[in-house]
Image (cartoon, rainbow, N blue to C red):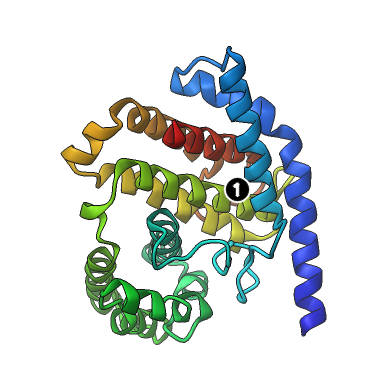
Amino acid sequence: MSGNKSSNKSRKHFEKRKVWAGVGSALLVTSAVSGVAAPADDSVHSAVSHSIVSFAAGSLGEGGEGESGEGEGEGEGSTKADLATDNAAYLARLGLMRGHLWVGIKLYREGHIAMAKTHMKHPKDELYAGLESVFKERGVAGFAGELSTLADAVNNEQGTEAVESAYDDLLKAITASEGMEAMSAKEALMSISQMIRTAADEYAIGVKKGEIVNVHEYQDAYGFTEIAIERLERLSDKQKAQAESDIVNTKALLLELRNLWPTVNPQGKVEGDVSLLYGAAARIELSALN
């Protein structure tokens, strides 16, 4: 079993190295999409270089593994960030959970019940279990009960009414645990950058030369990106005022990325360039840092 996990991690790290070759060109593309000029002075060039290097190192797991025990390559088990004190990392983790659930519900609503079940997380999953101590330190209730209710409703095929009601209750519980109203615009943007980087990691595994080779990872990337867009839309007027132009540009980048997912359950080829995801993540990070 451990041998399989090691092999999976090596494969994912290899894929991440390959896609980084396209990040430079992706940054130029995302500049055009967002209306932001490419960096011209040495100081900004230096910032871009530093961001790409550190961003790539984090993606490749240098200085420690970034994958969780789930083996999904989402960086959700990373020891680099203290989720009890790092608001951006905390928001990113909850955003990833929202993304799993979002795509699960979308699949459920479109009648892909078996696929929907694979995205429904349970409190016993490591993804949630690792958050219990974080919730305690942050003084929030968490959402174990609501998560379990939704998972049971979908997995036991209790019907649309039960599933939709459970999903609504779960979203309210996640929102209460996030505490977005107390976060800064910078923290929100940094969380979105982390989520899009994770989406890129998943997309790189799911799509090879236009072929869907792992539909679950392709779908995860879709969910993470949609939740990133939703997070921007949920920012308060006060938060938007803190970084108005950055938020507008970030939304433009994210909306452009939607072209990577023609449908949640594609048949045949998709025309998607994963470097666009990595490039957008790097540009959003730079925007937040500046």
Q: Which image quadrant for residue 232?
A: top left
Instruction: Tell me which residue sits at (76%, 35%) in the image.
Output: 21
Q: 22 left or right of 283? A: right
Where's the N terminus, which quadrant? bottom right
> Where is residue 8 shown, x and y percent of the image?
76, 68
Instruction: Tell me which residue sits at (67%, 25%) in the image.
Output: 25
User: Residue 191 or 42: which is nearer the viewer?
Assistant: 42
The image shows residue 148, relative to residue 7, as above or below, that is: below
Instruction: Tell me which residue sits at (37%, 57%) in the image.
Output: 87
Q: Residue furthest top?
A: 40
> Where is residue 63 shown, x and y percent of the image?
71, 59
Q: Is residue 255 visible?
A: no
Residue on which the image places disc 1: 200
Secondary element under disc 1, as helix, strand or loop, is helix
User: Residue 274 or 245: which is nearer the viewer?
Assistant: 245
Instruction: Tell me which residue sits at (50%, 50%) in the image.
Output: 194
> Where is residue 152 shown, x and y percent of the image?
37, 85
User: Residue 164 or 188: which is nearer the viewer?
Assistant: 188
Q: Is residue 115 visible?
A: yes
User: Residue 86 or 251: which is nearer the viewer?
Assistant: 86
Q: Which image quadrant for residue 70?
A: bottom right
> What amino acid does circle 1 point to?
Ala
Q: 178 left or right of 4? A: left
The image shows residue 198, relative to residue 132, as above or below, that is: above
Where's the C terminus, which quadrant? top left
> Where is residue 288 shown, x and y percent of the image?
42, 36
